[in-house]
Amino acid sequence: MKNRIQELRRQRGWSQADLASQLGVSRQTVNALERGRYDPSLPLAFTIARLFGAAIEEVFEPDPD
């Protein structure tokens, strides 16, 4: 799944650690999310979207296949 987490985080001037703290996850989890190596649970995806003030579809995009 593609996402815009890194772009949205950088727009706000947050580090990965800042975002991780706000989400209650580890910095490694944020790194894995940004690199597309980890797909978040549905509750975490909604939390991420809410934190950025965006619809979930504005943050996450399913892979085309």
Image (tube, rainbow, N blue to C red):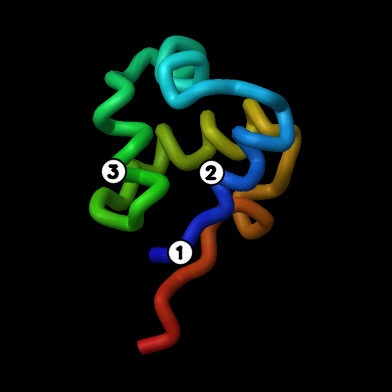
Give neighbour class at mark 2: few <14, some 14-19, many 20+ (Cα, 10 Å). Answer: some
Question: Disc 3 and disc 2: Cα gap in Å?
Answer: 11 Å
Residue kind at label 3, given as amino acid type = Ala
What residue appears at the point 45 percent right and 64 percent down from the top-left corner?
A: 2
What residue appears at the point 32 percent right and 19 percent down from the top-left corner?
A: 25
Q: How many marks?
A: 3
Q: Position of residue 33 (x, y in %)?
A: 36, 45
Q: Position of residue 37 (x, y in %)?
A: 25, 54
Quick one: SS at disc 1?
Answer: strand
In this view, the mark in front (2 or 1)? 2
What residue appears at the point 45 percent right and 71 percent down from the top-left corner?
A: 62
Earlier in the chain: of badge 3 and badge 1, it is: 1
Q: Position of residue 42 (x, y in %)?
A: 40, 43
Question: Disc 3 and disc 1: Cα gap in Å?
Answer: 12 Å
The picture quadrant where one finds residue 50 is top right
Earlier in the chain: of badge 3 and badge 2, it is: 2
Image mark for residue 2: 1
Find out whether the residues at labels 3 and 2 contact each other: C-beta distance under 8 Å.
no
Quick one: SS at disc 2?
Answer: helix
Image mark for residue 32: 3
59 sits to left or right of 32: right
What residue appears at the point 53 percent right and 38 percent down from the top-left corner?
A: 46
Give neighbour class at mark 1: few <14, some 14-19, many 20+ (Cα, 10 Å). Answer: some
41 sits to left or right of 8: left
Question: Disc 2 and disc 1: Cα gap in Å?
Answer: 11 Å
Residue kind at label 2, given as amino acid type = Gln
Give neighbour class at mark 3: few <14, some 14-19, many 20+ (Cα, 10 Å). Answer: some
Tell me the quadrant of the picture where the N terminus can be found. bottom left
Q: Position of residue 29 (x, y in %)?
A: 28, 32
Which residue is the site of mark 2? 6
